[in-house]
Amino acid sequence: MSDTQLSNCPTHVAIIMDGNGRWAKKRGLPRVAGHKKGAESVRKVIKASAELGVKFLTLYSFSSENWKRPEDEVSALMGLLGRYLKSEIVELHSNNIRFRVIGDRERLPENIQRLISDSERMTEQNSGMTLILALSYGARAEIAEAARKIAKSAKLGLIQPDAIDEDVFAAHLSTAGIPDPDLVIRSSGEKRISNFLLWQLAYSEFYFTNTLWPNFDKKDLIEAFQEFNKRDRRYGAIASES
Ligand code: IPE
Ligand code: IPE
Ligand code: MG
């Protein structure tokens, strides 16, 4: 299947990259070997997404609940993340990719926080694809944080309670200014949201594949896009051909 046969590329693709541990277990390897292999899929999928014309790519990389994992797995993941940022950011920048992070970054190790802010600053003028990593991210925490910010503004008289509508609320989320995902992909066969972008996914299309994340590549991405192209997005209205 050639890339040119894609009639309509989703503008914003969000991926729940799941199945690293199971990939490793199947091979009798430690879970961290799955995470390492998964980092290769991340590289491939970023490149493929930019080539196919995706404008925003959000990758769920570490959830607020993933802090509950054993300390050695968490520190291995943070180590991988640090190495990934150091080795990839120049390449991302040279490909005109803008890098952003959503999530509770204050819980991340300080060196990672620095790498993130340096990377965001370095790439903020880039006009190609925006790559958003969801790190230490939880949608309920994000929604509660938005409510807290709005309440503070209301208390100061900067906003009237009656003026709080969906647009005002969305503007207080960490994804302010980013269009909602058109397509959400989850690898590994699990079919749940796991506290990912609860507000933003209201009308997204979902695509589930049994492929484990370390095996996920451009071919899987194209398959997801082809399936996306068959969907009729009605947004509560009636079918477009009716
Ligand atoms: C996804 O793979 C990566 C992270 C959540 C960090 P998992 O580590 O969840 O892999 P499984 O689900 O145990 O196979
Ligand atoms: C979701 O995967 C989070 C990421 C992919 C980063 P999990 O493996 O943490 O989700 P659950 O526990 O199966 O719901
Ligand atoms: Mg998992």
Image (cartoon, grey):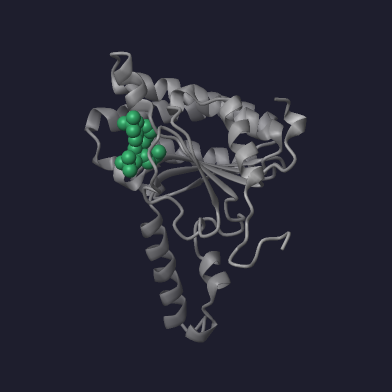
Q: Position of residue 213 (x, y in %)?
A: 45, 28
Q: Position of residue 98 (x, y in %)?
A: 63, 41
Please name the residue shown 42% across and 27% down the image. Answer: 212
Q: Nearer the viewer, residue 199 or 205?
A: 205
Please name the residue shown 53% across and 23% down the image. Answer: 87
Q: Residue farthest to the front?
A: 242
Q: Nearer the viewer, residue 73 or 192?
A: 192
| Depicted 122 relative to depicted 180: above or below | above
Q: Residue farthest to the left?
A: 70
Q: How many marks?
A: 0
| Depicted 219 relative to depicted 204: above or below | above
| Depicted 31 relative to depicted 184: above or below | above
Q: Quadrant of ligand 2?
A: top left
Q: Is residue 179 left or right of residue 175?
A: right
Q: Position of residue 40 (x, y in %)?
A: 50, 22
Q: Quadrant of residue 240?
A: bottom right
Quadrant, the C terminus: bottom right
Q: Is residue 98 visible?
A: no
Quadrant, the N terminus: top right
